Image (cartoon, rainbow, N blue to C red):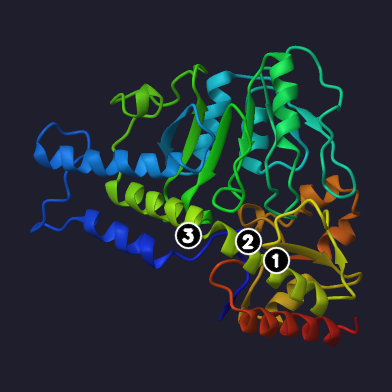
Amino acid sequence: MIYLDYQATTPLAPETREAMLRWLGGPDSDTFGNPHSPHRMGRMAAAAVEHAREEVAALFPPSGQVIFTSGATEAVQLALRGVGGPVATSAIEHAAVLDTARALGAPHLIPVDAEGLTDPATPLPEGLRAIAVMQVNNEIGTVQPIAAWHERARAMGIPLLVDAVQAAGKLPLAEADLIAISAHKLHGPKGIGALWVRDGLELSPASPGGGQEGGLRSGTLSPALCAGFGAAATLALERGEEDAAHCRALWLRARDLLGGWTLNGSAAQRWPGNLNVRRDGLDVARLMSECRQVMLSAGSACASGSGRPSHVLAALGLSPAAAKNSLRLGFGRYTSMAELEEGVEMIAAAAEAQGL
């Protein structure tokens, strides 16, 4: 199989797996302790968690704290419910942001242009409690002007939440007040994420109970997941330039092979590990059925079963038909050029078989 769906999830790095193994802890080991227990095994596990926290914190700007969560969705909910609504969000946010914002009251949607980019000078209503703009879009790969949005939020006296799931470990994380990330999007394990909270910003607790994570998010932490997250973060920082150059080479080659296809999103302001393209008249469901050896997507994995056209592509001004003629390819660290070429050539052949 050829895996071209890196926006949905990424392969576990060997170094990540190795870091996790020690803390899975069988009955003949001393590494299965509860990190919140006061005895020696508990303190060992707690030390592993705190070491991982420091490794993950290195991804973020200085002057903040890392709160471990079950993933980015929980991190987003912790952030937005912690500050309250109403919230202004970009029209192309992930459903985790949009649905949470709706639960807090009718959100103000910030429009995007035809390339999927927001304008930080967009008029916003009074009375907002937060602004939420993602750094890299999960469907079209566009990179938003987060620094300018942070200045806008500061001028309004409200926090900026950044969904940095697709940016973490790939791009420097921009200055913000709240940043949500997920380990499995940067070659870490599924089931763990983090919310970074700028120093001095107070949130209302989301899940009271045992008082873990500064009282914001109760529950027993998994040392194995934390250790894997930390190892993945460290590796991403070490390999950042190499991974980015590799993705750029793959993106350029894929664009060359799909020269007759139309790009969705900005060609310049983007993460090159994401390629979203369309072709008029393309039956994407048929293409995916005929290219079963190629793992690709017609949009966000979280919304793939809805049957609705992508809200991201609709926000760009695409018609429902054009949105349904689109597909997304994602690649990264472990994608070889040969795999990419074989997969893209199969996609192109399947499209040509439809008479396109």
Question: Which residue matches tag 2?
Answer: 244
Q: CA distance from mark 3 to mark 2?
A: 14 Å
Kind of residue at badge 1: Arg
User: Image quarter for residue 36?
Assistant: top left
Q: CA distance from mark 1 to mark 2?
A: 6 Å
Residue denoted by label 3: 187
Q: Secondary structure at mark 1?
A: helix
Amino acid type shown at disc 2:
Ala
Task: Please tell me which of labels 1 and 3 falls first in the chain.
Answer: 3
Is disc 3 placed on a helix, strand or loop? loop
- Residue drawn 87% across the image and 71% down it: 261
Q: Is residue 190 visible?
A: no
- Nearer to us of marks 3 and 2 is 2
Q: Position of residue 295 (x, y in %)?
A: 61, 73
Q: Residue at x 64, y 80 (%)?
A: 337
Question: Do labels 1 and 2 touch, CB within 8 Å?
Answer: yes
| Front position in the image: 67 or 77 | 67
